[in-house]
């Protein structure tokens, strides 16, 4: 094509449309400079960043997330961004502009020759980049000055107008690399070329280099929004990097075509001819789309492989936000449906088929509820009442309890109130995967003769199929205005799960200032030989009582107090006049004060609890089966309102304790042999710490942690988190729990 014809062709209007069309036709040559330079640089920077963040990465649903962002990570990330940005601005973008100009002018400029030509102009491009940074800083300073002097609206107006006025300076890039001008001269040249059509130039550059690329990025976000797991990792990482490479050819083609369009419209034949002559030359080589596209996919595939194969042994977690799954079912919003009680989280149990069941109970509902996951990933959830039409009957009742039977079914305490009974009475309900029904032949096993009961219960399965129910009840003083200071502790023994012949035995009467305030402050478990062990934590004074049976029938009972009462204000005596105020205060946080109990093979109890004094999370290691003496370790410090911890024993006998680290807003898991504990951050809290926590082991022996995450736009969330690769392979990421 002759020079006059080239000028006539380049002088046609529609730069944006024609520029994007040219970019599509010549996409592979335009991508090659970036593939030659940025792909190796991306691989190197990815490797450096992975090494820098190695001990802070956790893989959630096969997607890597940072638990924390240390200063060194910020420094590495900033250095990588700076290096990649400089290489892009000084070398790659100018080289693509040269290739684009060559294609527009009928010259097949080899990508390597374009990179060499851009490298020769690198000092000038570096100076031009410096001018751009100074210009943006000046615009930001002016906008901030306007904000301080007037109102925020004018800041955005002034800042936007100044930014649009600076857009024609993009045409200085072709002035430097195609005409060999100095940076200041290239900027002047850009504005002189754009002077007659400044508004059209600004519109073309804004849409072609900013708006449409940002829209493409947003479209990618929309496209991957519904993906999860493996698909999210592979598609998001590879597509994101490929899109970053694809944007540059379109931007460079629009800039090159807009520059040549202005030169052609001004009929500057000498300048036009000089640009053609200055284009680098080299032996023509055919475009190789397969190697180029493979190179563009390589960084994303390497990143995906590092996550999926996990050669560095990052902690892996499967996680489900229960509401996100339940909201997909329209029946969840129907009147009378069993809504999810995040504020009533009490326990979680492993199911026989690999799933889990979450037990929730609110004393303001007439019945408890079961949230059932069909598998450990909880992709299919069902939430239901433990009795029919429970939503139609409400009233304050004693807290319920549940335990798992050996066959996988759940045994639940059900409270009823009738006109013939002034208070409440309880029977047992058995729940399988389909429904809940009263235990066949079962009887009412206990009752509380108080319409506003102050009582707690806990449930455990005895060896051979029996059941033991622990119950703590306030001893009335006879004066409705006087707070009780005593509590009776009873054990109800049953030889079968239906409890057809319950045997109630009052085993202790203990001092209590606020035992009955917290539903999770009572726990019972079975020791070796079928001996029951129970623990009770005072939600006001921090006093702990351990009740242990010396024989299966519990004919001999020992009551010990490994933790003595501690008052928040040590200067005041327990009998001082502000005791009622203390009781009222305990109502505010009583639900968070909780205890979790496990009995080891040698009969010694292990107790995790949240202290009522300061909120510290502690682990108590009993030296004897009756816990007459015990050692303790603090897992989370006092001074923060943690949720009550959850404790289970794994198959090797180690204690696993799930608790909150509120200083860093994390969910933690401590693995303890005795009091020698190693803690690992399991998950960042998406919104904020909730007041409840529960844990069990799934069919594969992995911990399943259920917790509440509060503060989202939709309210609070119940979260099911399963660490997948215990024991953690990297001890370097763990830290010893503080004494």
Image: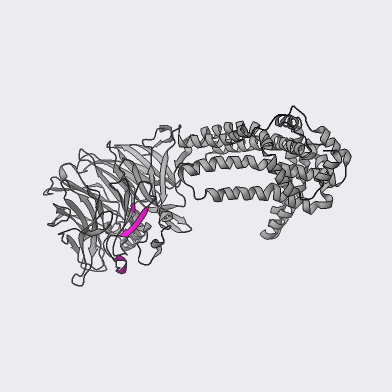
Q: Quadrant of the C terminus?
A: top left
Residue 737: horizontal and vertical position, in percent? 38, 39
Please identify the residue farthest to the top as the structure is shown: 283
Which one is nearer the viewer's eye here, 469 or 544?
A: 469
Residue 621: horizontal and vertical position, in percent? 27, 40
Residue 406: horizontal and vertical position, in percent? 22, 47
Please identify the residue farthest to the front as the structure is shown: 1
Residue 68 appears in the rendering: no
Which one is nearer the viewer's eye here, 357 or 331?
A: 331
Question: Would you say 320 lies left or right of 148 here?
Answer: left
Q: Please state the extent of the stretch shown in magenta in the rendering.
A: 372-393
Which of the colour schemes (rainbow, by chain, secondary structure, one colour) is used?
one colour
Question: Would you say 221 lies left or right of 332 here?
Answer: right
Residue 28: horizontal and vertical position, in percent? 66, 37
| In magenta segment, residue 708 | no
Q: Residue at x 20, y 49 (%)?
A: 461
Quarter holding residue 346 = bottom left
Q: Residue at x 75, y 36 (%)?
A: 98
Quarter holding residue 402 = bottom left
Residue 692 appears in the rendering: yes
Which one is nearer the viewer's eye here, 364 or 262?
A: 262
Question: Would you say 195 lies left or right of 735 here?
Answer: right
Q: Quadrant of the N terminus?
A: top right
Count of numbered labels shown in the rendering: 0
Q: Residue at x 41, y 36 (%)?
A: 734
């Amino acid at each position: 094509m002759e020079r006059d014809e080239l000028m006539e062709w380049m002088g046609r209007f529609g730069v944006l449309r024609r520029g994007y069309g040219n970019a599509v036709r010549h996409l592979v040559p335009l991508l090659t400079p970036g593939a030659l330079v940025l792909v190796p640089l991306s691989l190197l920077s990815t490797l450096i960043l992975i090494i820098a963040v190695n001990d802070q990465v956790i893989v959630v649903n096969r997607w890597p997330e940072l638990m924390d962002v240390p200063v060194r990570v910020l420094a590495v990330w900033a250095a990588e961004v700076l290096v990649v940005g400089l290489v892009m601005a000084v070398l790659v973008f100018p080289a693509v502009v040269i290739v684009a100009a060559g294609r527009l002018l009928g010259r097949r400029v080899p990508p390597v020759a374009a990179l060499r030509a851009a490298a020769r102009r690198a000092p000038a491009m570096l100076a031009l980049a410096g001018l751009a940074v100074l210009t943006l800083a000046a615009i930001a300073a002016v906008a901030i000055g306007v904000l301080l002097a007037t109102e925020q609206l004018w800041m955005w107006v002034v800042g936007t107008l100044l930014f649009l006025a600076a857009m024609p300076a993009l045409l200085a890039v072709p002035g430097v690399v195609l005409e060999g001008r100095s940076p200041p001269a290239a900027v002047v040249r850009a504005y002189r070329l754009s002077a007659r059509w400044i508004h059209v130039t600004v519109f073309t550059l804004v849409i072609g280099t900013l708006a449409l690329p940002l829209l493409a990025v947003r479209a990618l976000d929309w496209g991957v929004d519904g993906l999860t797991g493996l698909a999210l990792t592979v598609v998001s990482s590879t597509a994101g990097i490929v899109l970053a490479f694809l944007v540059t050819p379109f931007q460079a083609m629009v800039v090159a075509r807009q520059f040549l369009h202005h030169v052609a419209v001004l009929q500057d034949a000498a300048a036009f001819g000089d640009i053609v002559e200055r284009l680098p030359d080299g032996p023509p080589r055919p475009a190789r789309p397969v190697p180029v596209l493979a190179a563009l996919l390589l960084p994303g595939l390497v990143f995906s492989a590092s996550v999926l194969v996990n050669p560095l042994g990052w902690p892996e977690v499967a996680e489900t936000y229960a509401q996100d799954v339940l909201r997909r079912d329209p029946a969840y919003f129907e009147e009378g449906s069993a809504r999810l009680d995040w504020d009533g989280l009490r326990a979680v149990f492993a199911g026989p088929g690999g799933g889990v069941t979450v037990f929730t109970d609110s004393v303001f509902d007439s019945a408890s509820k079961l949230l059932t996951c069909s598998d450990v990933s909880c992709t299919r959830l069902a939430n239901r009442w433990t009795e029919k039409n429970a939503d139609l009957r409400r009233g304050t009742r004693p807290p319920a309890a549940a335990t798992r039977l050996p066959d996988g079914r759940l045994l639940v305490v059900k409270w009823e109130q009738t006109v013939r009974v002034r208070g409440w009475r309880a029977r047992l309900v058995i729940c399988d995967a389909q429904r809940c029904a009263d235990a066949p032949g079962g009887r009412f096993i206990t009752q509380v003769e108080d319409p506003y009961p102050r009582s707690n219960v806990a449930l455990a399965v005895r060896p051979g199929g029996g059941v033991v129910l622990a119950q703590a009840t306030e001893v009335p003083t006879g004066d409705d205005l006087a707070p009780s200071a005593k509590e009776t502790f009873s054990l109800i023994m049953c030889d079968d799960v239906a409890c057809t012949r319950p045997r109630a035995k009052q085993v202790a009467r203990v001092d209590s200032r606020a035992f009955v305030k917290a539903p999770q402050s009572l726990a019972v478990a079975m020791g070796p030989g079928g001996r029951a062990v129970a623990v009770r934590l005072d939600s006001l004074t921090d006093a702990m009582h351990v009740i242990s049976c010396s024989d299966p029938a519990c004919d001999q009972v020992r009551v010990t107090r490994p933790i003595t009462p501690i008052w928040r204000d040590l200067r005041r005596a327990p009998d001082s006049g502000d005791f009622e105020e203390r009781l009222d205060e305990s109502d505010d946080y009583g639900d968070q004060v909780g205890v979790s109990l496990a009995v080891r093979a040698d009969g010694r109890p292990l107790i995790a609890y949240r202290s009522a004094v300061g909120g510290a999370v502690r682990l108590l290691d009993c030296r004897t089966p009756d816990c007459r003496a015990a050692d303790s370790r603090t897992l989370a410090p006092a001074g923060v309102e943690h949720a009550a911890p959850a404790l289970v024993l794994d198959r090797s006998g180690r204690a696993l304790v799930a608790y909150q680290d509120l200083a860093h807003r994390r969910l933690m898991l401590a693995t303890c042999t005795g009091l020698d504990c190693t803690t690992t951050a399991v998950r960042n809290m998406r919104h904020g710490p909730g007041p409840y926590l529960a844990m069990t082991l799934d069919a594969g022996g992995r911990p399943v942690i259920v917790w509440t995450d509060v503060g989202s736009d939709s309210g609070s969330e119940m979260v099911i988190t399963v660490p997948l690769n215990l024991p953690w392979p990297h001890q370097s990421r763990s830290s010893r729990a503080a004494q």
